[in-house]
Image (cartoon, rainbow, N blue to C red):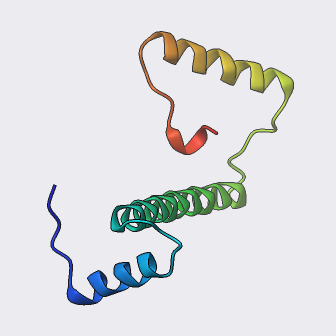
C-alpha cells in the first residue's frame, strides 16, 4: 500500500524517528493507527454509556442478579454455537 502524506505529516514523522523513540516511519504510523482505533472505540463506548444513562432515567433497566448473569451466559453460549461472534466492544 502506498500512502501520500502532506509535507507537514512527513516532517512530523521524521522528527519522531529522529527523536529516537521510533526506529522507523512504519512504527510511527502503526502507533498512530492504534491510537486512532483506541479513540474510535472510546467514542463508541461513550455513546453506549449515554444510551444506558438515558435508559436508566426512563426506568428501563434490570437488576443484575446471579440468575440474570447465568441467563446472559447461556444466551452468549447459544449465540456462539450458532456462529455469531461476540461484539468486540463488550469483550475484554
Measuring from the top left, give residue 5's x and y in whole percent: 20, 77
Measuring from the top left, give residue 34's x and y in whole percent: 46, 59
Seen from the viewer's position, the closer of residues 84 and 70 is 84
Q: Quadrant of residue 12?
A: bottom left
Measuring from the top left, give residue 67's x and y in whole percent: 81, 21
Q: Residue at x 51, y 30 (%)?
A: 86
Position of residue 15 relative to residue 60, above or below, is below
Measuring from the top left, give residue 54's x and y in whole percent: 63, 61
> Would you say 30 lies left or right of 68 here?
left
Position of residue 33 relative to residue 4, above or below, is above
> Would you say 44 lies left or right of 60 here?
left
In the rendered view of the protein, which quadrant contains the N terminus? bottom left
Seen from the viewer's position, the closer of residues 78 and 38 is 38
Position of residue 1 relative to residue 91, above or below, is below
Seen from the viewer's position, the closer of residues 16 and 62 is 16
Q: Quadrant of residue 57?
A: bottom right
Amino acid at each position: 500500500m502506498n500512502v501520500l502524506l502532506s509535507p507537514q505529516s512527513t516532517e512530523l514523522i521524521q522528527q519522531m524517528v529522529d527523536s529516537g523513540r521510533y526506529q522507523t516511519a512504519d512504527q510511527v504510523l502503526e502507533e498512530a493507527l492504534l491510537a486512532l482505533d483506541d479513540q474510535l472505540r472510546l467514542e463508541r463506548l461513550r455513546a453506549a454509556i449515554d444510551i444506558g444513562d438515558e435508559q436508566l432515567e426512563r426506568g428501563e433497566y434490570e437488576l443484575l442478579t446471579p440468575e440474570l448473569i447465568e441467563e446472559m451466559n447461556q444466551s452468549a453460549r447459544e449465540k456462539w454455537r450458532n456462529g455469531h461472534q461476540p461484539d468486540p466492544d463488550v469483550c475484554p
